[in-house]
Amino acid sequence: MPKLIYFTALLCTMLLVQSIVTAQTEAINKKDAKGLKQGSWQKMHPNGKLKYTGTFVNDTPVGTFYYYYDNGKVEAINVFDSRVKGLARNTFYHDNGNVLSLGNYNNQQKDSVWNYYSFDNHLVAQETYLNNKVVGVSKKFYLNGKLSEETYFENGIESGNWRSYYPTGQLKDEASYTKGEIEGKATSYYANGKQYSEGFYKHGIRIGTWFYFKENGGLERKAIYKNGRDILQKDEPTPTPLPNQNIEEEFNKQFMGGE
């Protein structure tokens, strides 16, 4: 008899707890008769950790929203502007707590200037957005703060001058983009400022005659490119990367925390 009373009490307690949790969840994640989100909302990760929490009024987010990694650390904070509907100031975080990026969202699309930071809190990129697309100059930086690359964009597509630099600030490469592809003359330089190469691109592929120079000056060799291959080379040449490939690799390495 005592066992029966014990198990009955235990069952009642479990049902009570379940009903309380359900009531709390329903009280938090509420929709009105029109199906619009109202009041406090939160979602959970599959592991049971909190994913986000925030407040809605008539299906519109208001105030501050907090987003979390599945380990419980803060992933992002969105602060919605009370004066401009849809405008929010966003801060993303690395999982070590340092800021990853800062910028605005306008109706869930990136807007205005965004800054991006490395794992150890160095500014590594700065871009301007309009309707979620990069416009104007996009800049990337070395960990020492020097400019590593600048690219001009129109409506999210590379268009116009492109330059890359050595960590000292010395110009490394210069070329131009048209509709997302390198077009026309491209020139590269040694770290001492002497010219390394000069030639032309068409649709992102090297064409025609290219000149390669020695570091102390003077012509080292000449190449003639057809369909992206140097036809003067007897052996299959090693594919030459586009000018900004090494800069991209360096940027990604810095952004993820370096070596």
Image (spheres, grey):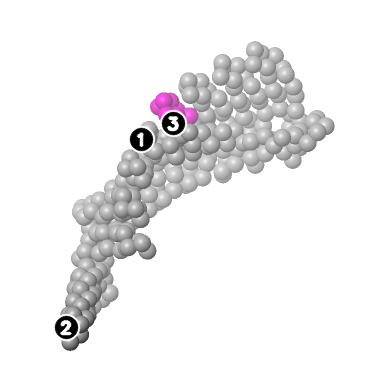
Above or below for 109 versus 154 = below
Label 1: element kind: loop
Q: Amino acid at mark 3?
A: Phe
Label located before the other in sequence (2 or 3) = 2
Q: Nearer the viewer, residue 173 or 23?
A: 23
**Residue 77 position (above or below residue 234):** below
Part of the protein shown in magenta:
139-148
Of 185 and 20, nearer the camera is: 20
Tell me which amino acid carries mark 2. Answer: Pro
Q: Position of residue 251 (x, y in %)?
A: 48, 35
Q: CA distance from mark 1 to mark 2?
A: 63 Å
Q: Earlier in the sequence, mark 3 or mark 1?
A: 1
Residue 145 x, y percent position in the rendering: 40, 27
Q: Amino acid at mark 1?
A: Asn
Q: Are marks 3 and 1 in contact (CB under 8 Å)?
A: no
The residue lying at 26 percent from left, 66 percent from top is 59
The dot on residue 2 is: 2
The residue indicated by pointer 3 is 141
Q: Residues within 10 Å of mark 1 (few under 14, many from 20)?
A: some
Q: Nearer the viewer, mark 2 or mark 3?
A: 2
Give the residue at x 56% y 43%: 180
| Residue 92 seen in the current view | yes
Query: Distance between the Cα atoms at labels 2 and 3?
Result: 73 Å
Q: Is 177 displayed left or right of 235 in the figure? A: left
Residue beneath disc 1: 121
Q: Is residue 112 visible?
A: no
Q: Residue at x 57, y 27 (%)?
A: 173
Judge from the rendering whether residue 44 lies leftward or rightward of residue 242; answer left or right: left
- In the picture, measured across the screen, residue 124 lies left or right of residue 189, that is left
